[in-house]
Image (cartoon, helix red, strand yellow):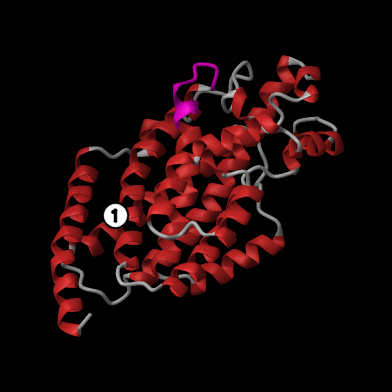
Amino acid sequence: MTRADTRTQADEAAPDRQAVAQRLLDSSQTLSYDPATEVDWETPLDPSYHGASPEWSTLYGTSYWDDLTAEQQRELTRQEAASVASTGIWFEMILQQMVLRDFYAKDPTDPAFQWALTEIADECRHSIMFARGAAKLRAPAYRPRRFVVELGRAFKTVAAGEAAYAAILVAEEVLDVMQRDWMRDERVVPFVRTVNNIHVVEESRHMKFAREETRERLKGAGRLRKQINALVVAIASYFIVTSMVSKDVYANAGLDPKRAIREAKANEHHKSMMRSSCAGLMEFLDSAGLLTRASMWFYKRASLI
């Protein structure tokens, strides 16, 4: 392919990319939420509700779950929901830094540039919303292990192009499926359902952008580059997904941590839920050339495939 051919392809792709970004901007103006006013922060927590759909609990389907009282089951799902929210904050802060770095000093009149700033603004509101939600669920500040935090620090510093956007997509897609269940479930405390609804609606635009950016950055990429970035994305995905529910949730819910961790690790029901939630995501990664034999090892370890 000549340089002229490459420039022609880039010139043809730019209007399409700008059109997508403009549609996302228009959608954001039409349908966006202010969590400060949309979520009922004032009503005290009703402990008769779950924090998440019970079927998404890491212990659902185990003998330990059956041994728990209804009150313990509800408390566990509240702690797990708070842990997922805290992990979401951690990753959203990584996301914001990667997007800011990607669009640094680029054309501010480009709709893609303006959408990137809109997405960052959304993520700031989401992080505050998750933080307030976790506090209302009476949970501590759950954080990934120190080793994972430092890996995240390195990833946000060096990840670029398709590696950054595909990793963003993985985190958002996994959250999206489980939150769609939670927001419709009347067993879940109402304010959490509202939080999930806001996140699902606004993240659908973010996922669209991440998919488009991933495809765009992969144009003209060679086999070696795809192999390397497929592995980088898979490793990042593994640590993101396995950090969603902290091991500390069990003690904070009043459970026996050793037994809970042991049974959660062997819980085939939860693994099946995770795999089913990622079917569309894996199809996209495969179509983009980012699902390789080496990367599949990490996805299997995380029960994403």
Using residue 177 as the reference point, say whether residue 252 is left or right of it.
right
Q: Is residue 135 visible?
A: no
Q: Residue at x 65, y 47 (%)?
A: 141
Q: How many labels sit on residues?
A: 1
SS state under label 1: helix
Q: Residue at x 70, y 29 (%)?
A: 76
163 vs 268, nearest the viewer: 268
Is the residue 90 above or below the residue 264 in the image? below
Is the residue 96 above or below the residue 61 in the image? below
Q: Is residue 164 visible?
A: yes
**Is 187 in the magenta?**
yes
Tell me where residue 180 appears, x and y as whole percent: 44, 30
* Quarter of the rendering occupied by the C terminus: top right
Using residue 47 as the reference point, say whether residue 161 is left or right of it.
left
Q: Which residues are magenta?
A: 180-188
Tell me where residue 144 appears, x and y as whole percent: 66, 54
At label 1, counting other C-alpha atoms closer than 10 Å, the crowd grade (few under 14, some 14-19, many 20 or more) is some
Q: Residue at x 77, y 18 (%)?
A: 66
46 vs 266, nearest the viewer: 266
Read off the residue under disc 1.
Answer: 118
Tell me where residue 134 appears, x and y as whole percent: 58, 38
* Quarter of the rendering occupied by the N terminus: bottom left
Is the residue 241 above or below the residue 145 in the image? above
Tell me where residue 115 appears, x and y as whole percent: 26, 57
299 vs 16, nearest the viewer: 299
Residue 108 position by quadrant: bottom left
Which residue type does callout 1 highlight?
Thr
Q: Residue furthest bottom?
A: 3
Q: Residue at x 65, y 52 (%)?
A: 143
